[in-house]
Image (tube, rainbow, N blue to C red):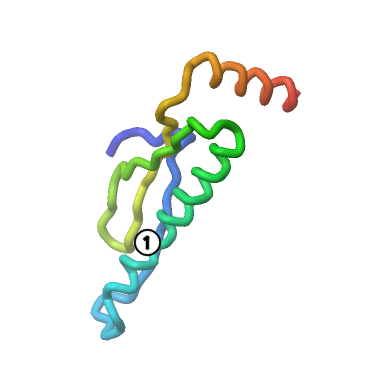
Amino acid sequence: MEERLETDFCFEIDFEKGSYENPSRVFKAMSGLIDSVQFLDLNLAQAIDISIRPQIILQEIEVGSLKSWLRNIIVGVEDEALKKLMLCQTSIDG
């Protein structure tokens, strides 16, 4: 398994093995969580700059309970614009 970065995050959904309930609900729940994060990321990024396009990368799926490791990246941003954003955030934080 590769080393986890601070930008990685995980959703874990426990389920009962052998359950007679609708098995697709587990995958629908994971899909809904990922879709919600993508929607939130897009809206937050576009509040800063409409050209920013956040992407979520599926890093790994683990066996056992359904556990998906994901990572956010930003696509299509000029380096200078990102530097200005980071400088602005640094001055606000401290």
Question: At 42% from the left edge and 50% from the top edge, which residue is drawn?
Answer: 10
Q: Nearer the viewer, residue 81 or 68?
A: 81
**Three-letter amino acid code at disc 1?**
Met
Tell me the crowding category of disc 1: few under 14, some 14 to 19, or many 20 or more residues within 10 angstroms, Cα based: some
Image coords of residue 14 (percent x, y): 38, 67
Q: Secondary structure at mark 1?
A: helix
In this rendering, position of residue 41 left or right of residue 92: left
The image shows residue 92, relative to residue 8, as above or below, that is above
Count of numbered labels shown in the rendering: 1
Image coords of residue 51 (percent x, y): 48, 30
Image coords of residue 61 (percent x, y): 28, 51
Question: At 73% from the left edge and 20% from the top edge, which residue is drawn?
Answer: 91
In this rendering, position of residue 87 left or right of residue 54: right
Image coords of residue 9 (percent x, y): 45, 45
Can you tell which quarter of the image residue 55 is in? top left
Residue where numbered disc 1 is placed: 30
Question: At 55% from the left edge and 19% from the top edge, which residue is drawn?
Answer: 81
Q: Residue furthest bottom?
A: 20
The image shows residue 71, relative to residue 18, as above or below, that is above
